[in-house]
Image (cartoon, rainbow, N blue to C red):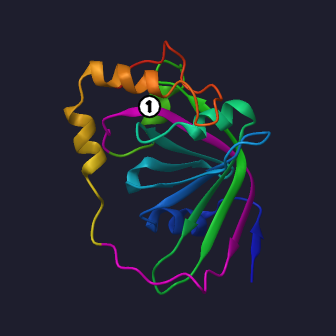
Amino acid sequence: MAKEFPSIDRSLRDFIREQAVFFVATAPSEGGRINLSPKGYRDTFAVLDEHTVAYLDLFGSGVETIAHLRDNGRITVMFCSFTRNSRILRLFGTGRVIRPDDTEFAALMRHFGDQHAGVRTIIVIDVERIADACGFAVPYYDLVDERPVLDAAHRKAIDGQYSRLIDRNRRSIDGLPALDADHPLPR
């Protein structure tokens, strides 16, 4: 049975920390496509306080989350247990995009593990609703390991490749503005 929580307490923090993957969902204000993205690397998600979370947004295949947050700020994060202890946890809230040249960026980076190459932004979410569900129909899966492919690709990238990525990430697939032309290159 679903339960709503007043805050992200120690038990929920522990559950979040144990998950190897989380999912991010956003949508534009009008029309357009709903975005649902899986995110990996356990050290890219952080609980900042009882109502605030953040995750590292790495360069990848698209820029929908940033475009949708710029459009309306709505975001949902879902954690799903694939172990014998079934549970789905959703964090509903309002997100904002923190660029590497924003004053908050360096302080927020301290909440994450090893520095990943290709950090595009940090997404900070003010959580307004916290709810879980049973997850009884979710299958069991065994985690083999984290996939190192994205980090490896970013480590090989040169500034010119990131410049092209920024160029290709200026608009969402629906044409909404995403990265600005002056977006800083990853370090």
Residue 158 seen anywhere in this rendered image of the structure: yes
The quadrant in which residue 78 appears is: bottom right
Does dot 1 land on a helix, a strand or a loop? strand
Which quadrant is home to the C terminus? top left
92 versus 68 height, above or below:
below
Q: Identity of the amino acid at label 1?
A: Arg
How far across and down, in percent of the image, does residue 111 sit? 45, 42
Q: Residue at x 56, y 65 (%)?
A: 79
Depth check: 80 or 9 in front? Answer: 80
How far across and down, in percent of the image, does residue 10 sit? 58, 64
52 versus 170 height, above or below:
below
Depth check: 132 or 67 in front? Answer: 67
Depth check: 19 or 177 in front? Answer: 177
Q: Residue at x 56, y 28 (%)?
A: 98
The magenta stretch spans residue 140: yes
Q: Residue at x 45, y 21 (%)?
A: 167
Q: Count the numbered circles shown.
A: 1
How far across and down, in percent of the image, does residue 50 sit? 66, 53
Q: Which residue position holds label 1?
A: 120
Residue 143 located left or right of residue 85: left
Residue 187 seen anywhere in this rendered image of the structure: no
Query: How dense is the environment of label 1, judged by Cα within 10 Å: few (below 14), some, or many (20 and up)?
Result: many
How far across and down, in percent of the image, does residue 52 sit? 64, 46
Q: What span is colored magenta in the figure?
A: 114-143
Q: Residue furthest top?
A: 182
The quadrant in which residue 74 appears is: top right
Depth check: 146 or 110 in front? Answer: 146
The quadrant in which residue 41 appears is: bottom left
Q: Residue at x 53, y 24 (%)?
A: 170
The magenta stretch spans residue 182: no
Which quadrant is home to the N terminus? bottom right
52 versus 42 height, above or below:
above
